[in-house]
Image (tube, grey):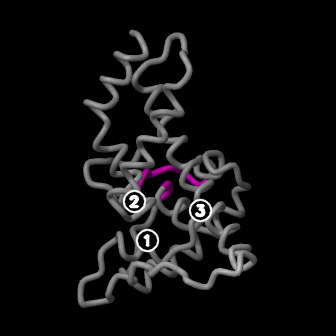
Amino acid sequence: MGDDDVLATLARERGRALFGYAYLLTGQSHAAEDLVQEALVRTFARRRAGFTPDDAEAYVRRAILTTFLDDARRRQRWSGVRHLLGRHDEPARDPAPAVGAVLDVRAALATLAPQERAAAVLRWCEDLTVPEVAARMGLADGTVRRYLSTAGHKLEALLGPLPDDESVPLTPGRTRS
């Protein structure tokens, strides 16, 4: 199967799932679309022999996570030095989602720091184990546990109790293995 065939199959069969994954990380449709597009370009820019749709999806998911975290780090670094330019006319920021009677997962995820958010999405939405999350993020298990603990407390304060390890994951249609 050629790269074009793999890309077509991936877009047709897993495109919505990849968008959903990116959307959980970014919380914005247009940002999720951009993130998936960037990940597809990074994944398919080079020819790979024997590349199956499953392999491609794993590469694209990793590229989505890496790009999200890199962009968050870049924004954080920029916010620390932008004052050196002498410009004080900051663009208007999107207002935080209003806290009402019904809070959704997207609004709750938006309150987390990027590393906490990525760990939470990988653990509770992608249904990965802590060691798998640590491997994907390139961190130690203990660091991931700390991010998950902090994220869990923040999310529970907004959403109520989180599912335990034996419960169904937050993403519909997925089952725990």
Does the segment drawn in magenta span residue 127? yes
Label ID, residue 117: none
- Secondary structure category for the residue under label 2: helix
Q: Is 89 placed left or right of 135 in the picture?
A: left
**Residue sitting at x 41%, y 10%:** 2
Label ID, residue 72: 3
Q: Quadrant of residue 103?
A: bottom left
Q: Which three-letter amino acid code belongs to the residue tagged 2?
A: Leu
Which residue in the structure is indicated by mark 1?
A: 109
Q: Is 127 placed left or right of 97 in the picture?
A: right
> As rendered, which of 28 and 136 lies closer to the eye?
28
The part of the chain drawn in magenta is 122-130
Q: Tags 1 and 2 in contact by the CB under 8 Å rule?
A: yes
Residue 48 percent across, percent down from the top left: 54, 16
Q: Residue furthest bottom?
A: 100
Compared to residue 169, the image places residue 52 above or below, namely above
Task: Identify the mark nearer the N-term, 1 or 3.
Answer: 3
Q: Which three-letter amino acid code belongs to the residue tagged 1?
A: Leu
> As rendered, which of 108 and 88 lies closer to the eye?
88
Q: Which three-letter amino acid code belongs to the residue tagged 3?
A: Ala
Q: CA distance from mark 2 to mark 3?
A: 14 Å
Q: CA distance from mark 1 to mark 3?
A: 14 Å
Which residue in the structure is indicated by mark 2?
A: 24
